[in-house]
Amino acid sequence: METVVLIAVIVFAIAVGMRWIHLLNAQHDARIAAHHFSEPLPRPPGLPDDTDRRAHRTGSDR
């Protein structure tokens, strides 16, 4: 009988934990969805169009 109660308590604790994690994830997702990111900064005048890292590599960087 004690084993059955122990297993029931463990299953109940797992279910409560799963529900709690689910609620925390939903709250986190809502917080991310509500956050408004700013527009990207405009490109300063005089910079070339391709400014990623690969565009600036030289033969000595490889």
Image: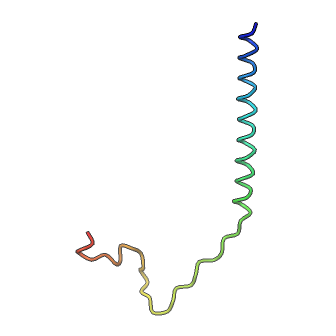
Q: Quadrant of the N terminus?
A: top right
Using the rendered view, name the quadrant where residue 18 is placed. top right
Instruction: Point out residue 30 in the picture as x, y percentages from the top left corner.
Output: 74, 56
Residue occupying image coordinates x 70% and y 47%: 25
Instruction: Point out residue 55 in the picture as x, y percentages from the top left corner.
Output: 35, 77
Residue occupying image coordinates x 69% and y 59%: 32
Q: Is residue 17 above or below residue 61?
A: above
Q: Quadrant of the C terminus?
A: bottom left
Q: Is residue 55 above or below residue 28?
A: below
Residue lying at the far top in this picture: please name it: 1
Using the rendered view, name the quadrant where residue 38 is placed. bottom right
Q: How is the image coloured?
A: rainbow
39 relative position to 30: left or right: left
Residue occupying image coordinates x 76% and y 32%: 16
49 relative position to 33: left or right: left
Using the rendered view, name the quadrant where residue 17 is placed. top right
